Amino acid sequence: MNLPSATLLAQSVLSGVFIGALYGLLGLGLSLCWGMLRQINLAHFALAFLGAYLTYQLSTVGGLDPLATLLVVVPAFFAFGVLMQWLFARFAITPFNSLLVTFGITVIIESAIQAVWTADPRMLDSAYGHVKFKVGALYVPLPELLTLVLASLLAIAAWAALRYTDLGKAMRAAAEDAPTAAAFGVNERRLGFLLSGASAAFAGIAGLCLALSFTLAPSQIYSWVGVVFAAVMIGGLGNPLGPLVAGIVIGVSESLTMALTAPAWAPLVSFSLLIVVLLVRAEKI
Amino acid sequence: MGPRLPTRAWIALAGVALALVPLAKPPAFYESFLYLVFHWVVLATSWNILSGYSGYFSFGHGAFFGAGMYTTATLAGQFGVPFLWTLPVAALVAALFGMGIGAVVFRVGRLRGELFALLTLAVTFVLATVVLNTPIDGGQGVNLGGVKLPAILPTPSATFYILALALAVLTLYIAYEIRRSRLGLGLFAIHDDEDVAEVMGVPTFRYKIVAFGVSCALAGVAGGIHAMFVSYVTVGETFSIIVPLTVVLMSVLGGTRHWLGPAAGAAVITVLLYLFTAGDYAIAGRAAVGLILIVVILFLPGGMLGRYAGRAAGRPVARGVAPPAGVEPVRGGVAPAAPPAPAGEPLLAVRGLSQSFKGLRALDGVDLDVRRGEILGLVGPNGSGKSTLINLVSGHYRCDGGRVRFGGRDLAGAEAHRIARAGIARTYQIPRPFQHLTVLQNVALTARFGRDALDRESAEREALHWLEFTGLAAKANDLPADLNLHQRKFLELARALASRPELLLLDEVLSGLTPSEIDDAIRTIRAIRDRGATIVFVEHVMRAVMELTDRIVVLNHGRVIAEGLPAEVMGRAEVVTAYLGKPRA
């Protein structure tokens, strides 16, 4: 086997870190909802793509700076998350049924995207897209760097909030034992709204990163599901730092696989990892 | 005439009627459309055999469908095997693949629900990657344009139609038969509470593997036919997440607890999608399907056929039938039994039984004999290891060390369903009935999976007998959720008795009952012993222990600290200490 040069390997590790950061960012809201609200939110991916399309629309047609679109997307998505939580709480949906209901929501959002923006691929041509830094022999594209920074900031912020604030402690207590927490004055309902809203807002932010680095197409929604679920499971449900770390591990192993063998072998890594984790750690999840 | 014949006849009749359709020479388009309906009927129904019946929701049906597709594509396309011969191979490959995965996954205890769904989805993607990167596909897809389609009927569309129809009829027939069989009952019990099902005698591992194998084999054949139908097989289309999601959607929509539910869902969804596509509203159609899914889950959790699901298992023999003669009522009139003779080999001999939970020694080398025909009281303070002992003997847990001999057979570490078959039955301290089975079905289950493995009708008669005995006959067709605690405790008892056990392990059947209910229960337990059962009686209600037991064993901190006649043992200093602590000074 021909080993690629050291520079090429380093560059592929770096791109693995970047793509892994996006896995982590997409997985953050998913993991929190799954771990703490016992909801498996498949619609998270559709929401991220909807956010990406909104960013695309607001900045190409509306002329906004892509980052500024967050001012619209984040509050709107937060409201959507609250609405979803209301629905889930109202009907006391089981974890498995949450998967099916959010699949329904996914299909509806996908259809809406296709109706508005058609099935043709869309590419956001922003000023950020062309900026690249050169560090030594390696290239660092600005959009990817932005993804890494956002993903790390949000993960650390979520971790710190859960660990150090009273609200976060209440949230963890409610996740562990809702009736007992409620008996001690924790308003579980409100926390659910907050968590679901925040997680939808995270999807909006992930959407921005998608729009900056990737070509958008409605059918692309499903291509992220498997690998991000892998990151969430490997990272541990409800652990805000888990998806980022696991995402980067997966991203790097994928890009090394691509560099050393053929690009098409990459999915094998993440899914084999997921299978092993499920089999070995089933008791702990 | 029983209810069996009509349904089977209906399946056959519908099959024959539909097989006549090509005679009318409809436009090829209609045959192809109906082909798609049958195709989805097969996929959804086959998925339901494992996932709907047992609750192991698989998101990997695309993998088994795809395994069949690529088996046919490879054999017919690359090796020139005649198309029809590839179909059994496709079934075999898909079944072996599924059972291989099952053999690994089903060994991992808690891998259920969403985790099983994810795992099977991951398997799909792994298989897709392997197929894509090996000569099986190679990245370009497999073109089957050159493969000859046997002319079963004059036109290709009619041939595909008749093939898919035949497979759909076969699949529905299999789904129906399984639903009514022991296998089906076992799968439904697994759905509600797998651990209890195993302890009640259901060979859970084997049943899941068998159901998975059947499910995958049918999906494999559907894949084989579909490979020829699309004539150009690609990884992207075959292994997409859309296949498993659609299949789940169809089954949930139709109702997973009914054998016909997935087929109904498949027909509705396929027709809906077609109507929208034909009217140029494909996008709106997809959105409508999404909306339907949400509405069904929220407002109709059992699916379209959910309300008929109970009946689909066959009308219980007992419904509307007067209580059989010869079942004597329990209440009152049961004479106290003579104490049993202590001679002979013990029925149950426990030696050095140990069990630890993460360093906590719950049982520490317990020796215990249970003599044939006696009621042995097992007492001790909370946490002394009584329930653990029951859990070990019944096989609910596997023990760390020690030997359990029962009726001359070594049972330590045996699978729980074998222990049940050997003639040991138990109750659970907190009743654990199968929530979606009726009271009668709950009890009939252990009769079918017990020592005598009764057939369906005898099992229901047996069950009704024990429901009479425990005073629950009026509740036979209710669900366990409709019972109060007292009744649920008696349901536990009836369920244990219906397996006709030699040894009955009663784990705190009296806790939580009122004094008059306790009197009832004591009479019932005496009556059970009078019928020849041997009983191990774990209880905190001392009055009952003193009244009922022939001998007691006292456990403390996982060890036997005293053994003997009830009145004598309970007066011993070390027993009083174990319960009340040491007196000061």
Image (tube, coloured by chain):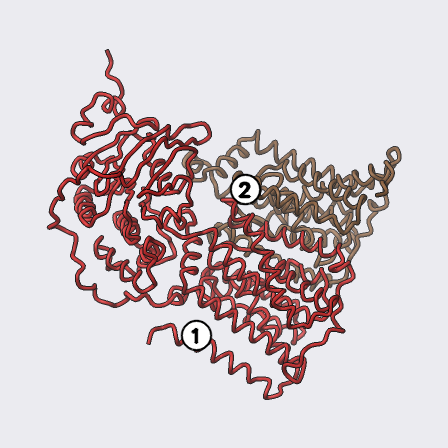
Chain colours: A brown, B red
| Residue A260 locus on image (x, y percent) | 80, 43
The residue tagged 2 is: A282
When asked about the image quadrant of residue B94, the answer is bottom right
Residue at 26% x, 34% y is B378
In the displayed structure, does residue A209 sit left or right of residue B552? right
Asked whether the residues under marks 1 and 2 belong to the same chain, the reply is no
| Quadrant including the N terminus of chain B | bottom left
Given the current orientation, which residue lies at the most extreme bottom position?
B24
When asked about the image quadrant of residue B138, the answer is bottom right
* Dot 2: chain letter: A
The residue mark sitting in front, 1 or 2, is 1
Residue at 34% x, 55% y is B442
Give the crowd class for mark 2: few <14, some 14-19, many >=20 residues within 10 Å: some
| Quadrant including the C terminus of chain B | top left
For residue A55, above or below residue B369: below
For residue B421, above or below residue B353: below
Q: In the rendered structure, which amino acid carries the disc numbered 2?
A: Ala
Q: In the rendered structure, which amino acid carries the disc numbered 1?
A: Arg
Front residue of this view, candidates A268 and A193: A268
| Residue A244 locus on image (x, y percent) | 67, 38
Disc 1 to disc 2, how far (Cα)?
A: 41 Å
The residue tagged 1 is: B8
Give the crowd class for mark 1: few <14, some 14-19, many >=20 residues within 10 Å: some
User: Judging from the image, what secondary structure is the residue with disc 1 in?
Assistant: helix
* Dot 1: chain letter: B
User: Judging from the image, what secondary structure is the residue with disc 2 in?
Assistant: loop
Q: Is residue A116 visible?
A: yes
| Residue A56 locus on image (x, y percent) | 75, 53
